[in-house]
Amino acid sequence: MTSAIGRFRAAASSSRSALLLSGFLAGSGLLHFAVPVPFDAIVPKVLPGSPRTWTKASGAAELAVAAALFVPRTRRLGGLAAAGLFAAVYPANVQMAYDWRHASTVKRAIAYGRLPLQAPLIGWALAARTGAGTSTGTDVGRS
């Protein structure tokens, strides 16, 4: 009986974590469309095409991944996609740190502080995969 309660608590906890990550990604994805200029500014200059195109594409990707994390049946894939997305946007964080290397102390702290945060975000995304399963969460914890 205790192990069933433990599995239920783990399921509820990992589901909440996946939903929180989904909300985080949805909010960020929406910001890419509502306020694109800051995102345009950190698109690595080596990428072809318009920074706005990359901003919109990454915003759409964040919204799609958020949706995949939100739905229990696609959460396993959504967590993997979120980890890939966090790795894929890391060059933008590096670009920001480079561009802001002579900026104010606060801006430098923000830009440099973002760099090590990608690793825990990737870990969170991979952990959110354990909230996958059926819509009732009965498969939570299975890998």
Image: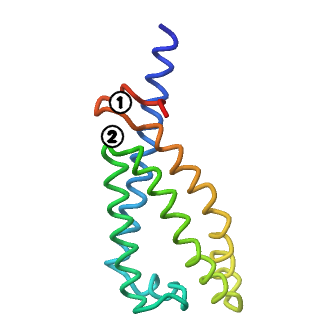
Asked if marks 2 and 1 touch (Cβ < 8 Å), the reply is yes
Write the residue at 51% across / 10% down.
2
Residue 105, percent from left and from top: 71, 83
The mark nearer the N terminus, 2 or 1, is 2
Q: Which colour scheme appears in the figure?
A: rainbow
Q: Is residue 31 above or below residue 16?
A: below
Q: Horizontal placement of 50 versus 3: left or right?
A: left
How crowded is the residue under tag 2: few (<14 C-alpha within 10 Å), some, or many (20+)? Answer: many
Write the residue at 51% across / 14% down.
3
Q: Is residue 56 above or below residue 135?
A: below
How crowded is the residue under tag 1: few (<14 C-alpha within 10 Å), some, or many (20+)? Answer: some
Q: Quadrant of residue 90?
A: bottom right
Write the residue at 66% across / 80% down.
106
Q: Which amino acid, mark 2?
A: Pro
Q: How many marks?
A: 2
Secondary structure under the numbered disc 1 in the rendered image: loop
Q: Horizontal placement of 87 versus 116: left or right?
A: left
Q: Which amino acid, mark 1?
A: Gly
Viewer-proximal residue among 128 and 5? 128
Q: Quadrant of residue 81?
A: bottom left
Residue 43, percent from left and from top: 50, 84
Circle 1 residue:
137
Q: Is residue 60 above or below residue 143?
A: below
Write the residue at 67% across / 90% down.
103
Circle 2 residue:
72
Residue 136, percent from left and from top: 30, 29
